[in-house]
Image (cartoon, grey):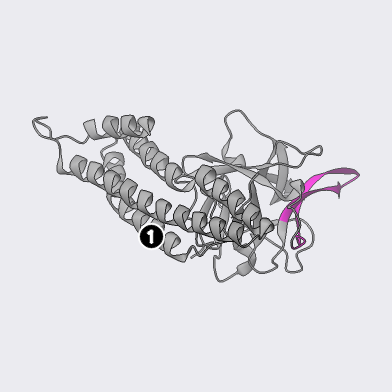
Amino acid sequence: MKRIAALLLLAACWLVTPAGAQPDRQMAALAKAKEKFETEISKADDALIGSLDKALTKAKSSGNKALAEKVAYERDLFVNQRIIPTTVPTAAYVKQRSQATAVLLSVYRPAIAALSKAKKDDEAVALESALSDLLKAARGYGLALPDLASRPPVIIESKATGLVLESRKDGRGELMLREKVGRRNALQCWFLDRDEKGYVITNAQTKESLYVTLAAVGDTTDYRVYTNPLEADKAVPDRSLFQLTELRDGVTLTSLYKGGAKGSVLAAAEKKLKGVTVHELLLTKKESSPSDKQIWIITEAK
């Protein structure tokens, strides 16, 4: 929280009037929006934790050991990682958090845009970082991802090519990179589900999730990303878990598979095939400063 306050103060200093006598109204609006957001999120968090505590007490008093363990486990996940629980109703919490976030963004985004328009890029980045940190503290992830609490379908777009991930209709074989259509093509829509260890990425139409496997590539075999159904009521296999690392407006998708592809990131590659430019998905070693081919833009499907 100290870092958030420092970034906000730094950005606010650039939003003063030319004379420097009084803080700009926008600076006051930013501070007010931050305070209101933190207050609303704190209230929502306390209410949800209260519901979990009541559910835990009830489970213990009824002798339901399995339920008590599950509630306690989900309580820890929520407190530490902001992963939404399944053992208590959460619709009210999701609505409150979504509304608080929308109000916060309505104040911060115009301020960031104004700084960018004035070509004060460093200042804009500082304010954007402050906003991202506020969101991370509230929901466990920042600006690079839409609010996942309501499980919206998302589009996963390559920053390098502008093409998006698309599953095959039968859910079999490698993923494809295609021109963006959005909600009109459910094969391009994905759900991001947060697991304790990472993210599960599931296609909206096929209901199958990304997973890493060895596949024949020409005369050799190499690791590729396919889709595959997950077994209900079983732990998510590591080959279907990915780490999403935020890089301002984009993310890298890193495989958590413990096999030979561990630590590899999903990348969009371009090559010539009989004089025609084609695009394919590869798992490559993560660059220290990821290039656009290793960065993905994730937005809610429209």
Instruction: Let me know if residue 211 is in the magenta part.
Output: yes
Which residue does the numbered mark 1 point to in the structure image? 96
Dividing the picture into quadrants, the one containing residue 131 is top left
**Element type where label 1 sits in the image:** helix
Give the magenta-colored segment's residue range. 210-232
In the shown orientation, is residue 143 left or right of residue 43?
right
Q: Residue furthest right?
A: 219
Left or right placement of residue 93 versus residue 187 in this view: left
Residue 183 lies, in percent from the top left, at: 54, 68
Give the quadrant of the N terminus: top left
Q: Residue at x 53, y 52 (%)?
A: 298
Q: Is residue 292 left or right of residue 112?
A: right
Q: Is 233 or 52 nearer to us in this picture?
A: 52
**Compared with residue 145, is residue 5 higher up or lower down, i.e. above or below?**
above
Nearest the camera: 130 or 99? 99
The secondary structure that most of the magenta stretch takes on is strand
Among the 4 quarters of the image, the one containing residue 48: bottom left
